[in-house]
Image (spheres, rainbow, N blue to C red):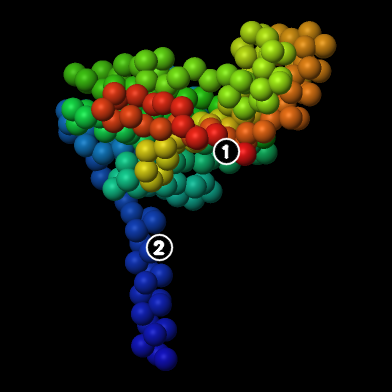
Amino acid sequence: MLRKMFLSIAALFIMLSSSYAVFKKKEADVKKNPVDILDFFLIIPGKYLDPFYGDMKFQERLNYINDVSSKQVVVDTKNAYLHLTEFITEMSVKQAMTYFVKADKSKLIGVSSAVSGCEGPDDCGLAFFEYKGGKFTDVTSKVFPKLSIELFCADADKKLITAKMNKAMKYKVELPHEGTECVVYPLGIGEVDNGLSPSEYETFLKIEQNFPYKKVLMVWNMAAGKFEFGKKVK
């Protein structure tokens, strides 16, 4: 009995120790040769991150990762996944990063952000980058298909969708912690400053109520180095 208790306590200690691992990085070395997802987070230009994290310099970001108090930090270098959640009053600011390996072994770096707690749908962002010669290049439009309301709505409602609705529509894209499939969720259209007439917005709400699909999977095509539409999930 005592042996089992000792083993359980030892296992818990190991788990907690790994959760609070301290990362040591030198800026010059990381910039010269980034090797894991934490490295890419530390050196990516701030304009590509949520401003809360983007305003931090290299050492500030590293200190932030190593200090886990009052926030949630996941750094899984084995699965090339990083996820941060900061709680600010009634809001939460989330930042996620991962990368996808292409056929030529180069990496496509995915960056997503989400701010929750504001009025209306969450404010979410998504972008994909190539990293070559010390430079991040936004290639989102080349590797990720354009999203539309038609992906989620009933066939009978597709004729009711306008260009303004598609422009105002918001989505959340979940980057994978494991595997290579992204998940797209429809968030809707905010009631204020949406660019729609009252009748258009009312029509959209009726379309949204009839959505038969809750999410759409995006499949990584390693050979082509881009994402493709996958299964729709009810």
Give the SS element for disc 2: helix
Give the SS element for disc 1: strand
Residue flagged by tag 1: what amino acid is it? Answer: Val
Nearer to us: label 1 or label 2: 1
- Tell which of 56 and 85 is nearer to you: 85
Total marks placed? 2
Examine the rendered structure and indicate whether residue 5 appears above or below residue 31.
below
Indicate the position of residue 54 as horizontal and vertical percent values. Answer: 43, 26
User: Residues under labels 1 and 2: Cα distance?
Assistant: 36 Å
The residue that appears at 50% across and 35% down in the rendered structure is 231
- Tell which of 5 and 195 is nearer to you: 195
In this view, the residue farthest toward the bottom is 1
The residue that label 1 is drawn on is 233
Residue flagged by tag 2: what amino acid is it? Answer: Leu
Indicate the position of residue 63 as horizontal and vertical percent values. Answer: 37, 41
The residue that label 2 is drawn on is 16
Examine the rendered structure and indicate whether residue 163 appears above or below residue 35.
above
